[in-house]
Image: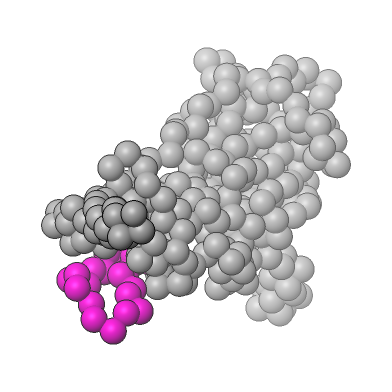
Amino acid sequence: MVALAFILLTLLAEASAKSCIPNKADVILVFCYPKTIIAKIPECPYGWEVHQLALGGVCYNGVHEGGYYQFIIPDLSPKNRSYCGTQSEYKPPIYHFYSHIVSNDSTVVVKNQPVNYSFSCTYHATYLVNQAAFDQRVATVHVKNGSMGTFESQLSLNFYTNAKFSTKKEAPFILETSEIGSDLFAGVEAKGLSTRFKVVLNSCWATPSADFMYPLQWQLINKGCPTDETVFVHENGKDHRATFQFNAFRFQNIPKLSKVWLHCETFICDSEKLSCPVNCDKRKRMLREQTGGVLVVELSLRSKLIPP
């Protein structure tokens, strides 16, 4: 009876060992999300079980998922333990993230062909976000899957009720003539990104048209700093949100274009590799030194006509 039980256990062990049918398809599926990267390879690649495969050669976190072994990098942050050896680099204007799934057998005799599935995700660093200050809202685009990711769907350009930037103001809103010159509060916010990424406003400008290249423009922020004393930048490059305020105005002598659109060129800055906060005070001092004490206000080259 004992011998029979031993034979049954042996047969079960052999069946279990042969349950993984080698798959020789050299395929890897990669999904690049704003905060997460997911990689999938066919089950049993060249005879390897999921517990024998390591993400980045470090993490044995693969799971079975519909005929694939799935590996997840849940946060694009090197300080997070789940980062699992993923490497990154910044080659303007692109962020690159690299990793691999590798077989790792500690036994003396390796019976399967070693495998190494390399993959990468790339993300653009600069985006243009638009909002109709006094007109209809502009929808953002959805994130793209595949080897090319984007942060764009996580960005939004919002208006706020005051300088605390805690309560959003619905746009479009009506600006009465008596409110010309009053303070407007705006900001670009990124949601769902790794904490390593900070929002930097490179430039912001207003137009009487949804076309960000419309020849009539009013420049508010240039190279991360205010263009004049009517604009105040509260935060830029310090967090997931960059905020500023400016005086309300209107474009004159344009009867068919009474709407104002706000555009911001936004840079997603990797604080692990770059210095993100914008120091406008230092820039002002440099300009004064270069101009003999006269502060020069830089205007965008896009501006062909500026309202008085």
The magenta stretch spans residue 257: no
187 and 204: which one is in front? 187
Relative side of 29 to 61, left or right = left
Q: Residue at x 57, y 19 (%)?
A: 136
- Residue 13 screen position, x and y as percent: 30, 58
Between 142 and 9, the one lying in front of the other is 9
Horizontal placement of 308 versus 267: left or right?
Answer: right
**Which residue of the protein is positioned furthest toward the front in this rendering?**
1
Where residue 140 appears, as percent x and y from the top left, is: 49, 32
Up-down: is 171 above or below 53?
Answer: above
Q: Is residue 25 visible?
A: yes
Residue 260 vertical placement versus 103 (above, below)? above
**Residue 11 located left or right of residue 79:** left
Vertically, is 26 above or below 243? below
- How many circles with numbers are drawn on the protein? 0
Q: In the figure, residue 278 lies in which quadrant?
A: bottom right
- Quarter of image, res 109: bottom left
Q: Residue 31, percent across and down?
A: 37, 47
Residue 119 belongs to magenta span: yes
Seen as rendered, the residue at the extreme left is 24
| Image quarter (top left, top right, bottom left or bottom right) of the N terminus | bottom left
At 85% from the left edge and 41% from the top edge, which residue is drawn?
163
Residue visible at 44% across and 64% down in the picture: 60
Rendered location of residue 277, percent (x, y): 68, 65
- The residues colored magenta run 99-126
Q: Residue at x 80, y 40 (%)?
A: 165
